[in-house]
Amino acid sequence: MFDRKKPGVELDYNEEGTAEGRALRGGIEWTDMVADVAAATKAVAEAGKVGVVGYCWGGSIAWLAACRLKVAAAIGYYGGQIHEHRAETPGCPVMLHFGELDTMIPVEQTDEVRRLHSGLEVFTYPAGHGFNCDARADFDEESAGIAAERTLAFLELHLG
């Protein structure tokens, strides 16, 4: 997703990598991100139903893909900008995962998204932001395992 600003970039999970990622992300418009996902889904459409899974920034992009594109399912892990786009309505089944101890995404925002979109599968875990990434300090093996099981079952159900 960073190729629009810096092709081929690979960032470490450290302070410098996070800062660079945030700077790169800030210069990319949401419409461009959704266009990139649309191109990717088109490229693999011959394989069958297409689902989108995203983590952090990608979790928010997965939400927008569910709302703006024709995908069969979308899963977002700790998407911090989902609340910003909460008025949009998904056109497919959506599953969201959030950490209850996430200092970047207030629980109140997660609860509001859940209230506004009662058909969503929204799960919270006793973990922080990035709980699914074993390269981060907030990695929580138990929460990541439960979320992965739920994600795989959801994808099997909606993608076959």
Image (cartoon, helix red, strand yellow):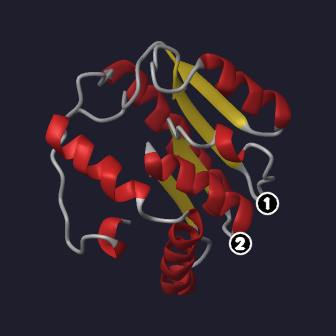
- Describe the element under mark 1 as helix, strand or loop: loop
Q: Which class describes the residues within 10 Å of circle 2: few (<14), some (14-19), or many (20+)?
A: some
110 vs 80: above or below: above
Q: Residue at x 62, y 72 (%)?
A: 49
Q: Amino acid at mark 2?
A: Lys
Marks 1 and 2, the one that precedes in the sequence = 2
Q: Quadrant of the C terminus?
A: bottom right
* Residue identifier under label 2: 70
Vertical placement of residue 145 versus 74, above or below: above
Specify whether residue 68 is in view. Answer: yes
Residue drawn 82% across and 28% down?
115
**Label 1, on which residue?**
91
Image location of residue 87, percent across then percent down: 80, 46
Q: Nearer the viewer, residue 107 or 25?
A: 25
Q: Amino acid at mark 1?
A: Gly
In the image, is 134 to the left or to the right of 89?
left
**Residue under the point 44% across and 42% down:** 56
